[in-house]
Each structure stands twice: as C-alpha cells, then as structure tokens.
Amino acid sequence: MVTNNQGGFITARQYPQMLLFKPIILENGIQIQAPDKHTATILYKDFINHPLLTEVWGNHFTAFAAPAKINQWLSQYFNSAVQLRWLGKIHSRRIKKFPAIPLSFADGYPYLVINQASFKALQKQCPSDIKLEQY
C-alpha cells in the first residue's frame, strides 16, 4: 500500500496517477513500473524491520516501510512525500466485525481491484481456475 509519511493510506481518488503504475508480484518482493516505464524493485526482506503505525479508513495497525530510496523514487511521481508499506508476514490489522482474525490490507472487504499483470501472476500461482468479473 502507499501512505503519506504519517502512515495514512492514500488512494487513487486523491492521486489518480496511482492507476498508471503497474505492480508485478515477485516470489520474494514486488516490482513497480511507473507511467514513464521506469521500474523499482523491492524485496520483502528489504522493508525496514521496524513496524510503523499505519491507518486505513480509521483502522490503525502496523506496517513496514520500504527503504528511503524506494520511497523517494515513488514520491517523485506523486509530487508529495509518500511511502510504500507492507503488512509483513504476521498481520496486526483487525476490524470490529472480526477482532480475533488478523487481516491483510483488504481482507475485510469483498472487492478486489487488480490489474491485468497481477491477475496473470495470480493465475500462475493458483492451482484452480480463477473467475474475474468486471463491474
């Protein structure tokens, strides 16, 4: 997820250019292709091993920030200081409806917004058929 420097989640409603980035899921990290075709690769092991307070729609939990080099690269496209954050292998996010169940970023919601590259990567990793519907 992308946050401001205070840990507040930002969306494409605020930053429409976010929709022009192409995330590519790797086995050990993620590669991000910017609208100008430049790329940045971050491995999960390279996220700063210090959990930071993060907030999504009033829900507070911890996440790990990418190194400064990655965040500076992203920030130039947003014309604002932003951070790439990862929840890590053990999730601290909880929601009121299921407080005992740790969630990933969007597990609490039934909708998935995904681009074609991520969908193809998911198809390669999933042993069963995946049905994708557009609304």
Image (spheres, rainbow, N blue to C red):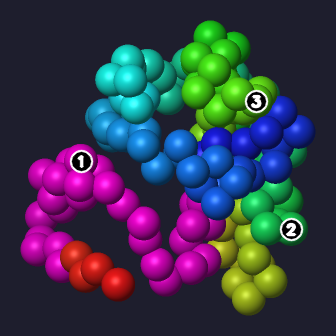
The boundaries of the magenta stretch are: 103-131
Q: CA distance from mark 2 to mark 3?
A: 22 Å
Occupied quadrant, residue 128 = bottom left
The tag earlier along the polypeptide, 2 or 3, is 2
Q: Is residue 118 magenta?
A: yes
Rendered image: mark on residue 58: 2
Name the foreground residue: 4 vs 85.
Answer: 4
Vertical placement of residue 74 versus 63, above or below: above
The tag earlier along the polypeptide, 2 or 1, is 2
Residue 59 location (% of width, % of height): 82, 66
Vertical placement of residue 15 versus 40, above or below: below
Q: Are marks 2 and 3 in contact (CB under 8 Å)?
A: no
Occupied quadrant, residue 89 = top right
Whether residue 125 appears in this view of the structure is: no
Q: CA distance from mark 1 to mark 3?
A: 26 Å
Q: Is residue 62 magenta?
A: no
Query: Is residue 68 shown left or right of residue 133?
Result: right
Identify the residue position indicated by label 1 in the image: 117
Residue neighbourhood size for the residue with mark 1, other residues' Cα within 10 Å, grouped as few (<14), some (14–19), many (≥20): few
x 60%, y 77%: residue = 108
As helix, strand or loop, the secondary structure at mark 2 comes to loop
Quadrant, the C terminus: bottom left
x 40%, y 31%: residue = 35
Identify the residue position indicated by label 3 in the image: 80
x 73%, y 43%: residue = 3
What's the amino acid at mark 3?
Ser
Occupied quadrant, residue 81 = top right
As helix, strand or loop, the secondary structure at mark 1 comes to helix
